[in-house]
Image: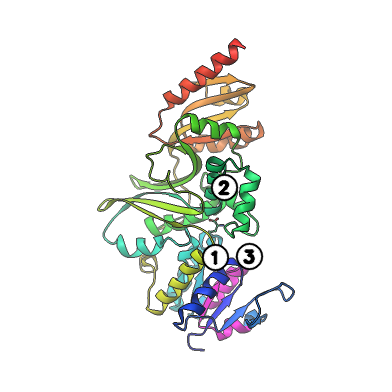
Amino acid sequence: MGNKIGLIGFGVVGQGYYEIATKDGKNLEPEFIAVKSREKLRPQGINFQYDLEKILEQSGIGIELISETEVAYEIAIKLLEAGKTVISANKKLVAKHLPELLKLERKHGGKFLYEAAVAASIPVLSNISTQYQGDEIEVIQGILNGSSNYILSKIQQENQSFKEALKGAQENGYAEADPTFDINGSDVASKLCILSAHAFGVHLEEKSIPCIGIDHLKAEDFLLAKLSGGKIKLIAQCSKIEGKITASIYPTVVGPNHSLSPVEYEYNAISITSKNVGLQNFQGKGAGGLATGAAVYSDLAKSNSGFQYELVKKGLKKEYAHPASSEQQFVISADSKVLDDNFPYHRKYSFEGKSYVLGSFSSNHVEKLRLKIFESDGSILAIDKNISLDKIAQHFEFKALEFAEE
Ligand code: HSE
């Protein structure tokens, strides 16, 4: 068997890795390539195989790059139980099954590397593993989905419609085959689970993270961001404050001085604040065949020189934990009754048939109301702490006055 490499899946990322491996000439190209469908049109001159079981048996290293999470799970289990190496870009697989896969890795002496699963080309997990020893990470903030960032850039920089921009993200190979998780924030939630496990040793249950994607955003939200001198970014945050882990994902209005404001199109970025180092920013392509394939290829090279994440030694402190509630500024629009009933003491404005509330609210409170808000065709927009709600209130007061005068 030796260290024969079996590649499972030949989609956008598989092809990216394959292109790099065949060009680099360091004997890190796959011996076998397993694909599911015999009917699909594929590049000529490559020997595709269809017997997955046989390939898993014959490979010492399995590079799993398929989209079906449960099949990926079966593959990872089988390889790790045999003490083999698994390399994956599947964030759903890692976010859901990390505790179990870590245990198998430790028990059977295999290796499990998945740098490409978080922010594609940015080596953030390896960095946390190697560069933050003796340090304590306090806050992680990031843009973690290339497709949604691409869509937001296309809308805000180029006036494209959501539909057009999504089509562009699909055509460029940034979006998943089914883009639902790219636009509803679920993809980001998976990545945040993995980051929390590596940074804090606390593996969060994905569903417990308050998470709103870009799919509910409306033209008026973009206008509001513009009027406040900022733009909307899908910001994920995770922090450890007084021993409590917080986590949330919200479309957020950020001002021009925010470190994530200049990150456009398919780029991702991650800001890490730690006790010893202070703030460090990492930025790079967060999606795309070559960018993600490069991370897979590097994992392969690293696994050959014995690299393993620190997490394997340290283990997880908590599995399937729920984040604590955190507080931040919001502008929420909804039916006026929903707002009056649930935000009785905050600034509210009504005009053009819509009602808005401005204030600092807890993520738990917002989460409880999200269904009601979206059912009444409303929206939830977080406002970065460096943008003054008073300034936004001025805009609303002006609009309300204008509307009353009409
Ligand atoms: N669809 C993902 C994204 C790919 O757009 O970020 C990388 O995880």
Q: Amino acid at mark 2?
A: Ile
Q: CA distance from mark 1 to mark 3?
A: 18 Å
Q: Image check: 121 left or right of 314?
A: right
Of helix, strand and loop, which one carries label 3? loop
Of all residues, the one furthest to the front in this rendering is: 158
Please tell me how crowded label 2 is: few (under 14), some (14-19), or many (20+) other residues with Cα within 10 Å.
many
Q: Identify which residue is drawn at 30% across, 62% down.
A: 131
Mark 3 or mark 2, whichever is nearer to me: 2
Q: Image check: 385 left or right of 86?
A: left
Identify residue for label 2.
151
Of helix, strand and loop, which one carries label 1? helix
Q: Please tell me the numbered disc located at residue 130.
A: none
Q: CA distance from mark 3 to mark 2?
A: 25 Å
Q: Identify which residue is drawn at 35% across, 62% down.
A: 127
Q: Earlier in the sequence, mark 1 or mark 2?
A: 2
Q: Earlier in the sequence, mark 3 or mark 2?
A: 3
Residue 100 picture location, percent across and down: 50, 66
Q: Amino acid at mark 1?
A: Gly
Q: Amino acid at mark 3?
A: Glu
Quadrant for ligand 1 reads bottom right
Q: CA distance from mark 1 to mark 2?
A: 18 Å
Judge: label 1 CB < 8 Å from ligand 1. Answer: no
Please tell me how crowded label 3 is: few (under 14), some (14-19), or many (20+) other residues with Cα within 10 Å.
few
Q: Which image quarter holds the C terminus?
A: top right
Identify residue for label 1.
289
